[in-house]
Amino acid sequence: MSSLSELFVILTDIILPIFVLIAIGYTMQKKFRMDLTTLARLNIYFIVPGFMFVTLYTTEFSGMLFARVVFFFIVFVFILYFISLFIARFLKMDKDKRTIFSNSVMFFNSGNYGVPVNELVFHGDPYAMSIQVIVMAFQNIFLFSYGVFSLRSAKSGRMVAALSYFRMPVLYALLGGVILNAFQVPLPEFIWVPANYIRDSMISIALLTLGAQVAQIKIISGLSSIYYSLLIRLIGGPLVALGMIYVLGLDGITAKALFVASSMPTSVNSAVIAQEYSDYPHYAAQIVLFSTLTSAITVTFVIFLARVLF
């Protein structure tokens, strides 16, 4: 198969199905005006924790893999942060806008975009999915801690926000799945069966929600700096990840999964928290919209390169 043919197959078999579901969510939101707050809470408090728990509970992976993925993620995010900070200062952004710009680069859509891509690329391989779930978990932890605090730096209530984070089930789903897996604790059927039902609903509901969220974004002119965000997130991110993979000596599915995970577009939740805490919510929403659309091309190329390199 030629390179062009393989790129076309990746686009039609992996990326296009994802955008079909996003389009359905977009259309339904335009027609029915669904309650996005309810959809977001359904994902954050019910579907994502259930998906994370089942995946981490059923996957065989070592503590070394867990530590390696977390280390990779932390270094990766820090590198992107300093790159984005340099560009933001070069563009002479004010503090609030600079924070949104950095967040758009650091926080990528590892959940309702990254999980379906991983599922299709690796054909449901539990090892590859466990890597994606670890990345997703720490993306959420970092987004709803540093991401919120960075926007509230000039405001009060940080301690309240920190304490409220520990009421979110994502963290406990992560810990519960890993601990019960490590000690091989069996689960009764009345828990295990509904947990699997929740896991199976993750991809369709997540992409439906993403489409509905995109439908709410308004296009505004005069925001040329969003292109810098797209360049760093969609091209710079995978390049940084590729360099780290070679430096750390990673290979096989681990390298491939991390490389693909690094290419995801800007997280929708980065616009959600900007709506709540920033003076530039439309700027954040613009970045999410164009990042998601452009990713159809860039993610296709990254998947192709991952197949060639690893």
Image: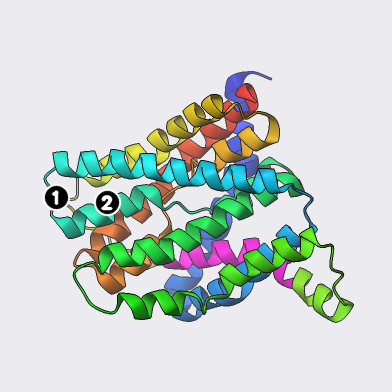
- Residue 280 x, y percent position in the rendering: 21, 63
247 or 38, which lies in front? 247
Q: Which residues are magenta?
A: 197-215
Kind of residue sitting beneath label 1 = Met
Q: Is label 2 in contact with label 1 (beta carbons under 8 Å)?
A: yes
Mark 2: secondary structure: helix
Residue 204 is inside the magenta segment = yes
- How many discs mark residues in the rendered view? 2
Residue in view at x 56 percent, y 59 percent: 137
Q: Is residue 62 left or right of residue 307?
A: right
The image shows residue 228, relative to residue 153, as above or below, that is above
Q: CA distance from mark 2 to mark 1?
A: 9 Å
Query: Which residue position is annotated with label 2?
Result: 101
Q: Is residue 53 left or right of residue 48?
A: right
The quadrant of the rendering that contains the C terminus is top right
* Quarter occupied by residue 94: bottom left
- Residue 163 x, y percent position in the rendering: 43, 78
218 or 147, which lies in front? 147
- Residue 54 x, y percent position in the rendering: 74, 64
The image shows residue 72, relative to residue 190, as above or below, that is above
Q: Which of the two discs, 2 and 1, labels the residue nearer the N terminus?
A: 1
Q: How is the image coloured?
A: rainbow
Can residue 112 be seen here?
A: no
Query: Which residue position is annotated with label 1?
Result: 93
Count neighbours of disc 1 (C-alpha within 10 A) and say few if under 14, some if 14 to 19, many if 20 or more: some
* Quarter occupied by residue 260: top right
Kind of residue sitting beneath label 2 = Phe
The image shows residue 137, relative to residue 86, as above or below, that is below
Q: Is residue 238 left or right of residue 87?
A: right
* Quarter occupied by residue 229: top left
Residue 135 is inside the magenta segment = no
Chief secondary structure of the magenta portion: helix
